[in-house]
Amino acid sequence: MRNKIKMRERDYEPLVSVIVPIYNTASYLERCLKSIVDQTYDKLEIICIDDGSTDGSELILDEFARKDSRIRAIHKKNGGESSARNVGLEMMTGQYIGFLDCDDWIEANMYERLVSIAIQKDVDMVASPWFKDTDEESIKIGNQLPVSPEIFEREDLLQYIYKRDYYRGFTYMWNKLYRRSLFYDERGEIILFDEDLALGGDVLYLGRLALNTEKVVYLDEAFYHYYQRDTSGCHTVDLNKRKDWLEAYKRLIRYIEDQGIKTDALVWIKRFLAYHSSNVAELAYEQKNYKVLRECQEIMLKYSKEYCETNKKYEDRIVRFEKLLRLVIE
């Protein structure tokens, strides 16, 4: 039987919507779903979107949904992770929102702790460190430099997210809890993922949520287990998919500049675009794709100043960057 907690700060328990896109992860899905339904925080709306699975994941989802009425199982034609997440966003009814990938899992007290802090501190977002998991080990990923234990504002959050050498604990979407209001733009319309991006949709979306945030707190307890698979999208050698990552950063930069948002984090976002461009350039060179190599080198040149400025402590990175800029396919 679940241990239903009592919130000391308020006399109610807000509903938390957890959005889980699912696609062909039958080997891991049971562990994932079990970690959600076994949460010590009971008031959950578990929105699971099967994005056209063909490996039995859809059957595992339906079995869990039969046993737990909090699970809303949706089956749709395959359209990609962003498409699946958008279905969840349009269905969510919770006061707070969380995300979980279908091959990962969470500690049993994750939402109990995050909700408690969100209410106690009255913040828009609660962030926390996470575990990097492989079949051999589980390593807590936190921050190299200290993070304020007090409530902080948007500019600090942006610095924490994009100064990744120092603050890896802020990197992803799923190790956080969000107030529902963050998901709406200035017109009151829900912000959706860009479905044309095969990769990098979460990069752009986390940036949009962060830019909507006014008050944040960091809880230095790790709950989320990020399982590292060699077959995951971030390891793909498909150049078109890898270019989507670059496009996500370009769109985030364009949004910040078009909106006239002033933030010192912009130089770090441009640094990441240059960095990912260097990775794709290296891959394009190996695949002898002249067009993609040149496209990436143009981005690298455009943001070379920002890249070198933010990597002054890492001479080897600058040497590699400059070497990739000189690559030519005969």
Image (cartoon, rainbow, N blue to C red):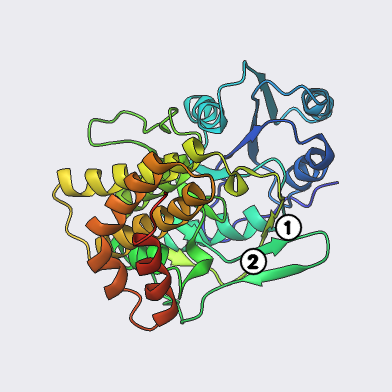
Whole-angstrom CA distance, mark 1 to mark 2, is: 8 Å
* Residue 317 falls in image quadrant: bottom left
Q: Amino acid at mark 1?
A: Glu
> In this orientation, which residue lies closer to the viewer: 151 or 296?
296
Q: Which mark is residue 215?
A: none
* Residue 61 falls in image quadrant: top right
Q: Horizontal and vertical percent for residue 197?
A: 45, 33
Q: Is residue 115 above or below residue 149?
A: above
Q: Is residue 17 above or below residue 157?
A: above
Residue shown at 70%/44% (left/top)?
231
Q: Amino acid at mark 2?
A: Ala
Q: Callout 1: helix, strand or loop?
A: loop
Residue shown at 73%/57% (left/top)?
107
Q: Residue furthest left?
A: 260
> In this orientation, which residue lies closer to the viewer: 279 or 212?
279
Identify the mark nearer the N-term, 1 or 2. 1
> In this orientation, which residue lies closer to the viewer: 195 or 211?
195
Q: Is residue 123 visible?
A: no
User: What residue is pinned by disc 2?
Assistant: 222
Q: Callout 2: helix, strand or loop?
A: loop
Residue shown at 41%/57% (left/top)?
278
* Residue 88 falls in image quadrant: top right
For label 1, the crowd category at 10 Å Cα-Cα, with few meaning under 14, some 14 to 19 and many 20 or more, is some
Q: Which mark is residue 107?
A: 1
Residue shown at 64%/43% (left/top)?
101
How many marks on residues?
Answer: 2
